Amino acid sequence: MPIRLSGLQSGMDTEALVSALVSSYSLQKDNLVKAQTKLSWKQESWKTMNTSIYSFFSGKLSSFRFSNNYNLKAATISNSIYAKVTAGSSAVNGTQTLEVKKLAATGYLTGGVVSGTDDSGNSAKLTGSSKLGNIKGMEGITDGSLTVTVDGKTTDIQVSSDMTVNQFVTRLKEAGLNASFDENNQRFFVSSATSGASHDFSLVSNNDSGLTALQSMGLFTVNDADKAEYEKWAAYAGDADALTEVKNAAYDKIKISYESRAKAYADKYNAAKTIVDTMDADDTWGGIDQAKTSLSTQKSEFETKYAQYAKVGDDGSIVKDDNGNIQYDTDKLEEDGLLTEFNSESSKISTLENNISVYEQNARIMSDNADYVTIGADGKAVAAAATDADTSAYEKIAAEVDAENAVLKADSDAGIDAKVAYSQKMAALYSGGSLSDASGAVRIVGSDAEIVLNGATFESNTNNFSINGLTIQATALTGTEKVTITTDTDVDGIYNQIKEFFEEYNTLIKAMDTAYNADSSSGYEPLTSEEKEAMTDDEIEKWEKKIKDSLLRKDSTLGNTSSALKTIMASSIEINGVKYSLASFGIKTQGYFDSGENEKGVYHIDGNADDSVSAASEDKLRAALASDPDTVISFFSQLATNVYNDLSSRMTSTSLRSIYTIYNDKQLATEYSEYTTKISDKEDEITRWEDYYYNKFSSMESALAQLNQTQSSLAGYFS
């Protein structure tokens, strides 16, 4: 805003005069601002109302359309100690018998207390970072071999005294087990991730060092799961075909393929070629020959230039590092102000040396791999294949891979033979009863749950069973007792759903009627800043609330929607030739003169203990649900569908409103933008008129100043 000094000659309050002259324009602008403010409040009121309508539409109303949402069943058990039972919609009404024979268990191994030592051999507690070699009995173990089998996955674990406790625990986890080491109790804990016999695990040794490791770590037990694993491998000794199959399967997992090796050679060649091509294309590089010549020249000039700064040893010779580079006295270089220049030139030489090294290294990689690839017309390597015209490259790879695979196969077969032989030994010890749980470990073998329902036996790897609509969670063994499960229609559940539906509907219809029937706010308009300054905060709040509460008063869209909902809710629906209405189930509105303010559309359920209006009446709804639930469900499903379809048609997208919106939000947004333009235009108009009047008053002041100056001059002549 410009600073205006006016009225100096005339003594007039120019600003007040100008303000009065443009007051009619300012009033027009204020009215536009008030109208826009009122419109923004109306947008907020509609947004709030629309949120309530859409919440009802997409929530309770939507779910009430489908009969399967009412089809609740309730299941009770004669003794809840043994099981928890819930019934789904497909559960059959009636009474059934239940016996719990077994509970599911998770395979669990609680390790024995380990004896730890420090590096000096003194007793000490172990931590996760302790070496396994600090466990008594684990000293010097280098080749311990264990196998974990769980969920069909077999993993070999190599154990040594140099491995840490945490590393061993990590290996068990990677094999598919839950594992931890409790530093307070100095025990390992190992378990299956899932309960049940099929998810149980085995932890066996493959050699004597492995057995010693298990015993020392408190993880060795004599149990059926480990015994079965040893017997499985021992059996291969008498079945040559099965053993060959196992060996081949193990070899297939580790063997090298010709294709992967050929691709590896091509990838190395191409990666090196990319670097070489890039350096060859760099003008600053100049190529390897030029770079070497340049390097020789730069080094010679550098050494000559800084010869006097070279360090000299006690024997008078120049000091060099292990790579033959001359060492310089940087302190003296800094004293002479040459250190920065020295470092810059030295860096350039180092960069050039590195570039030459990188180039030659990659050129060598290309050379080393060239005999194992096919070079295309573009100079890039392609993995050699047996079908190439020149198969020499592929034959070299095949010979190389065959030699390596032969070694891998021999080592794999030897390992399996050793495992089979060791398993024979362990199986014999199991059979002879020569093994004991001296480590203090406790093993729980994984097992399945078993129940008998109506005489039929069911098994599960968990304690949960889903049978013909029933969900049964077994919690205790019944022994010789039989318990009963009774399934019936959940009258209370369906009743509460209907009750909740009407609670939500009543809240919505009352809010709509309250907004539609609001008191008029005629004479009330949004306040300007100046008007607010003359009022207290409480007065402002009450003033604005009066306006906001009336914004949807007699709104045609709101009134039509409310009327449509009431009409549909009051309509009849025919089911199997009989017409029903809400009143048929004891659900009614109060009389016109008995209803509270804006509650004429509110429904009350006869016999509802939570509703003082209808609590004393006969409970027709609950009786209907108990005697004929299908009719009740069919009625409410159709009623909800009718209301849903009507609201859906009112919430379709048009040029004036968005999808799922009951009011013309697009139109209101357009009107708001138009007000913004009008207000801006009016502000510009006010500014133009203010400038016009200020210019007029300024001209008058200038004329008065000139007149005063003339009068002063004339007065001087007569003084």
Image (cartoon, rainbow, N blue to C red):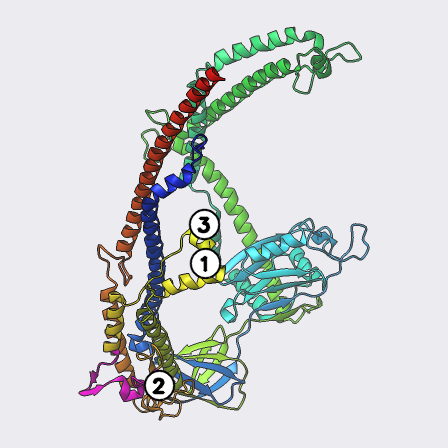
Q: Are marks 1 and 3 in contact (CB under 8 Å)?
A: no
Under mark 2, the amino acid is Ile
Foreground of the two, 126 or 666: 666
Q: Is residue 619 magenta?
A: no
- Label drawn at residue 241: 1
Q: Are marks 2 and 1 in contact (CB under 8 Å)?
A: no
Figure quadrant of the N terminus: top left
Residue 286 drawn above or below residue 598: above
* Res 72 visible: no
- Label 2 residue SS: strand
Badge 3 crowding class, 10 Å Cα cut-off, few under 14, some 14 to 19, many 20 or more, is few
Badge 2 crowding class, 10 Å Cα cut-off, few under 14, some 14 to 19, many 20 or more, is many
* Res 460 visible: yes
In the picture, measured across the screen, residue 164 lies left or right of residue 684, that is: right
Q: Nearer the viewer, mark 1 or mark 3?
A: 3
- Label 1 residue SS: helix
Which of disc 3 and disc 2 is earlier in sequence? Answer: 3
- Label 3 residue SS: helix
Q: Nearer the viewer, mark 2 or mark 1?
A: 2
- Give the extent of the magenta segment: 569-595
Badge 1 crowding class, 10 Å Cα cut-off, few under 14, some 14 to 19, many 20 or more, is few
Under mark 1, the amino acid is Asp
**Distance from Cα at disc 2 to Cα at disc 1:** 78 Å
**Distance from Cα at disc 2 to Cα at disc 3:** 73 Å
Under mark 3, the amino acid is Asp
Which of disc 3 and disc 1 is earlier in sequence? Answer: 1
Residue on which disc 2 sits: 605
**Distance from Cα at disc 1 to Cα at disc 3:** 16 Å
Q: Is residue 579 magenta?
A: yes
Residue on which disc 3 sits: 252
